[in-house]
Image (tube, grey):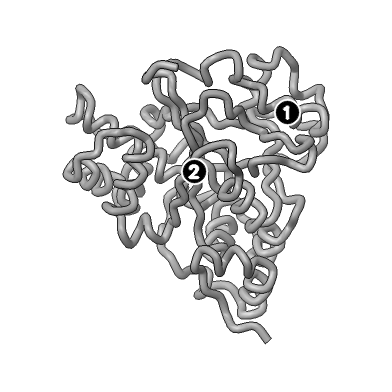
Amino acid sequence: MTEDQRYWYLASYPKSGNTWCRVFITELMRLAGDNPGEELNLNQDIETGAIASSRLWLDDQLGVNSCDLSFSELDPMRGRAGASAWLFAEGERFHKVHDAFQSPDSRGRPVVSTAGCSGVVYILRHPEDVAVSLSHFFSWPLEHCVDYLLDSSAALLPGERFGGNQVRQHMGRWDQHVRSWADQTQLPVLIMRYEDMLANGLETFAKLVKFLGLPAEAELIQQALDNTSIDRLKKLEEDVDGFAEKPAGCERFFRSGRTGEGAEQLSIEQRQRLAKGLSGVMKRFQYEGPELD
C-alpha cells in the first residue's frame, strides 16, 4: 500500500469529540498545504473520509442493497467492505466510526475492514458529560440519555430494516463500546481522552499527529488548535448558517465543549447509576463519579 492509500479510523461513542478531531485534522492539513490563507468552511472542507456506516459505500463495495438485509445478514459482511479496494477514495483518509468494534450480529467479526488499515484513534469522554451532550444533540430527556449509556443494545438508527444514508450502528453500553476498541488487538490504537484534548491540547494532539503521520511542527499544531477552538467553531458554524451534520431540532452542533456539565446537570441518582453501571472502565480511564452507597 502506498503512502497516499493509507487509512485510519477515528472511533468514539457519539458526542465524545470525534468531529472536533476531524476538524483539527482538516485544519492542520490545510495549514500545511498550498492554500493556508483560505478560511475553513465547515460544510465544504471536512472531507477526512466517509463514515464507516455509509450505506451508499457499503452497498457499492458489497454489491448488495443493504435495505433488504437484516442486521444478522449485514453485520457479518461489513468487515469485508474495503478489503479488495481502497477505502472510500484516494489519498490518506480518516474515517469516523460510532459502531462498537463488533456487534451482537457480526458473529465475532469486526464491523469495519481491518485489511490495510494503519490504526484507530479512539476518543472517549466522561459518560456524565456525554449524557448532557446527547440530550442537547438529540433533544432527549437526561434520564433517557442515562438509560441509553447503560443499554447493552443501544444503537443509532435502530430498527430491523431502515433506509437512509447510514446503516444501523450498534454501540452497546458506554463501557462495552470503550472496551471493544481499546482492547481489540487487530489494529494499532491510540486512546485520547476528551478531557486531555481540552486541558493539554498541544501535548495530546502532538501524539495524534505522530500516530497519523501528519505534519508535526509544534507551531503548526498550535495554530490548528487555535483555529478549531470551541469559540472559533461556533463562529464558523454561524458563518455557514448551521453545520450540515447537525440533526433537525438541534440548536447548534458546537455548543459548549466544557467538561463537568454532567456533574452540574445530572441528579445524584443519575450520576450514581452511571458510576455503578460503568465503574470498571470509568476507573480504568480515571473518570470520577459520586460516592456509592
On the image, which quarter does residue 170 sit in? top right
Q: Residue at x 42, y 29 (%)?
A: 48
Name the element at disc 2. strand
Task: Tell me if mark 1 has few (under 14), some (14-19) or many (20+) residues whose alpha carbon lies within 10 angstroms of its own.
Answer: few
On the image, which quarter does residue 101 sit in? top right
Task: Please provide percent x and percent y for residue 285.
Answer: 51, 63
Q: Amino acid at mark 2?
A: Val
Task: Please provide percent x and percent y for residue 3.
Answer: 37, 20
Q: Residue furthest bottom?
A: 293
Rendered view: 36 above or below 195: above
| Quadrant where the image shows the N terminus | top left
Q: Nearer the viewer, residue 280 or 269?
A: 280
Q: Kindly identify which residue carries mark 1.
A: 163
Observer able to see residue 221? yes
Task: Please provide percent x and percent y for residue 18.
Answer: 47, 45
Observer able to see residue 256? no
Q: Amino acid at mark 1?
A: Gly
Name the element at disc 1. loop
Q: Kindly identify which residue carries mark 2.
A: 189
Q: Residue furthest front?
A: 185
